[in-house]
Image (tube, rainbow, N blue to C red):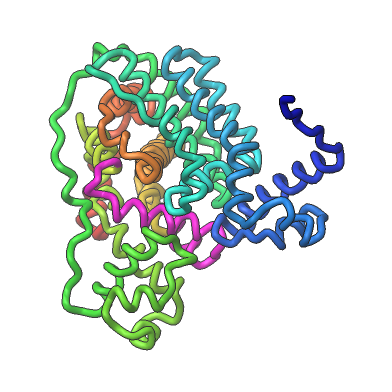
Amino acid sequence: MPRTQRTRSARAVANDTAIRDAAVSEVLRVGVDHVSLRDVGHEAGLTHGATYARYEDVDELLVDLWNSVLCDRAIAMFEQCMRAAEDPNSSTVGAIFDFIRATTPADVACVQVLLTSRRIPTVHEEVEPFIHDYLEREFSEASAESAAFTRGITIFAMTMVQIFADSQFGWDRDYQSVLEKLLLETLETDPRDVDEVKLEEPLDRIIGSPGDDLKSQLAYATFGVVGKSGYTRATISRIARRANCSPGAIYKLYPSKEDLVIAAFHDLMRARWMKISNFVNVLEEGSITQLLYGSASHHNAVRRSFTLETALAAAQSDKLRVAVLGQLSELEAVIPLLTNISDDEKNRLRYLIRSIMFVSIGVTFLSTVTDSLERLDFNQFAEPFRRAVLKDGVPTWSVMCQQILELKQGRGF
């Protein structure tokens, strides 16, 4: 006789829900790498034994959490972005921002588990079908469908980072109405009106070989160890072995692992686009496309993994959070110094910087999940977005640029 599925009791179902809710809370509180069955059980109001009877280990808990809760949230987020890209109108684009404003803890946990799954084999095995079915599509030639997919996945990447940033770093949402208008105009651009642009290999983002001094060797080792294993598993001993020195030699230079990672992060963030004086070229034709292409390139693999892991760790470390936010806010530091520019125009410039930064970081982070982004024609998003900004976003851009260049000469930005 065929086996019948045993009906689970209402109490068992309630316990499952309590455990999953508790697991989401713990992911947000301590990060994926610090979730423990004991703490989840305690948060759920269950005994230690009851939690271990349900799951073999934390990885199995994360697998269940992804399959039962988080995967549906990832699909909902992605499909919302694709609907806007395929049928752009005020309703579909507005729904993306409604989704962001109504973000739940499960949405934030979804982003964290998706971005860390690559280094947790058991979890990645379950996340991989979502990656394959939604994030990886092949198109034989340039078409409206390929353009829509490029635009949709780019917005998905930006939305993902927006959700994480709002939750962990408290970013101001005031610019969303401006960004919503810019995105609508971007998506309404006919793909046939967007020409290809000539791109250069993004070699400026390659992390070069370290010098002879110990600090550069430690930075180089830290990039690799943190990027591959995550901040928590990147011990001082592992970094010391990679740098061919003793842990004691590291502690003579840096009081803690946090300080070492912050020093490496500051060194890494000296990239071209992170300097306000170079940001003045961002609205030249092809510049945003080149930026996104570089973010997705395999040449950028070490940089993007380290940046991602540092940002994730900053959610649980005040010192790292201050360092990350301080570095990102440097681009906006010049705005109060501009003269004869209205407050509205200054705000629009701030929104421009933030939106380009978010989309670039989003592509950087999502490219750690799949290499399919390297094959996208980012110009289908970047060029319409550039046109929208020049038309409605920052009409006095040229005046601002001139002042920024003058400030560069006088103050060394």
| x and y percentages locating residue 3 in the rendered image | 73, 29
276 falls in the magenta region: no
Q: Residue at x 35, y 42 (%)?
A: 367
Horizontally, residue 402 falls left or right of residue 256, namely: left
Instruction: Locate the C terminus by quadrant.
Output: bottom left
Secondary structure character of the magenta stretch overall:
helix
> Looking at the rendering, which quadrant does residue 63 occupy?
top right
Q: Tell me: residue 93, above or below residue 398.
A: above
Q: Is residue 45 visible?
A: yes
Q: Tell me: residue 324, above or below residue 405.
A: below
In magenta, the rendered stretch is 296-325
Q: Is residue 399 visible?
A: no
| x and y percentages locating residue 198 in the rendered image | 13, 30
Q: Residue at x 29, y 39 (%)?
A: 400
304 falls in the magenta region: yes
Q: Tell me: residue 326, above or below residue 217.
A: above
Q: Residue at x 61, y 53 (%)?
A: 27
> Looking at the rendering, which quadrant does residue 152 occupy?
top left
In this view, the residue farthest toward the front is 1
| x and y percentages locating residue 267 in the rendered image | 29, 64
Q: Tell me: residue 219, above or below residue 308.
A: below
Horizontally, residue 127 falls left or right of residue 136, namely: right
| x and y percentages locating residue 93 in the rendered image | 50, 20
Q: Residue at x 60, y 27 (%)?
A: 98
Task: Compare residues 125 and 135 and report the one nearer the observer.
Answer: 125
> Looking at the rendering, which quadrant does residue 16 occupy?
top right
